[in-house]
Image (spheres, grey):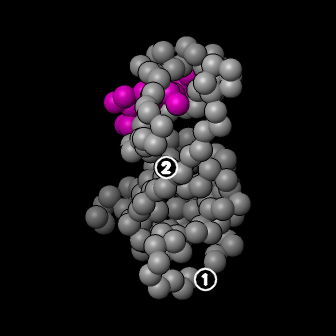
Amino acid sequence: TILCPGTHNLESHMSLCKCEQVFMPADVVVKKHGGMPAICETGCAYIMNSNLLHCGGANLPAGFGGARRRMMYVTFQTPGNTPDRSSFSMRDDLIDEFYLSDFDGGPRIPRTPDPTRKALLLAALLNNNDATFEFGQLLREQGDPGAVEWFRKAAMNNHTKSFYVLADIFKIG
């Protein structure tokens, strides 16, 4: 695993987007953002802000001590506050499927799956600007303060209605 210290901010993420737009080679992107290998002993774990720029590195061949790596990916968020990144499953089919209450031994919290929400979220994560705006609208209707992040994301991609909605939100407070 390669970690880029100090990159859990908007400036670094904008820089990464610019690198992707010009098809900059991955090794150059990692170097530009201060990437360094995260090496630890067997049984250790990394705990980090998932907004930190990071990527997987190559495994060593078995003859050089390499072995299969396992990963446990856990994110936490305040219920009813959907952020614009970093708290979703690595597998799209598992988004919104499991919650901490499913694993902590306590009583299960009942919930009803929302296929519209999931479809909009998946499309927004694939950079569909209209879906990003619509997902923000859905969250706003539900009183979710995370809606602002989705409107901001759409506005940064020149979605006109998003500018209007953000102005309205900031005016109202």
Give the class, few, some or many, for how many residues have Cα within 10 Å of label 1's Cα (few <14, many ≥20). Answer: few
Q: Residue at x 37, y 28 (%)?
A: 5
Q: Nearer the viewer, residue 47 or 136?
A: 47
Work out whether 119 lies above or below 129.
Answer: below
Identify the magenta region.
1-19
Question: Is any atom of residue 74 visible in this view?
Answer: yes
Secondary structure category for the residue under label 1? loop
Q: Which residue is mark 1?
A: 112
Secondary structure category for the residue under label 2? loop
Residue 79 in percent (x, y) is at: 42, 71
Q: Earlier in the sequence, mark 2 or mark 1?
A: 2
Give the class, few, some or many, for how many residues have Cα within 10 Å of label 2's Cα (few <14, many ≥20). Answer: some
Q: Nearer the viewer, residue 99 or 29?
A: 99
**Residue 17 among those drawn in magenta:** yes
Gap between marks 2 and 1, in whole Å? 23 Å
The kind of residue tagged 2 is Ser
Q: Which residue is mark 2?
A: 86
Q: Nearer the viewer, residue 129 or 92?
A: 92
Q: Residue at x 59, y 55 (%)?
A: 89
Residue 57 in percent (x, y) is at: 59, 26
Quadrant, the C terminus: bottom left
The kind of residue tagged 1 is Thr
Q: Residue at x 54, y 51 (%)?
A: 72
**Residue 14 among those drawn in magenta:** yes
Q: Where, by quadrant of the figure, is residue 38 drawn? A: top left
Q: Residue at x 44, y 81 (%)?
A: 106
Q: What count of labels does the image hold? A: 2
Work out whether 16 lies above or below 92.
Answer: above
Question: Is any atom of residue 162 visible in this view?
Answer: no
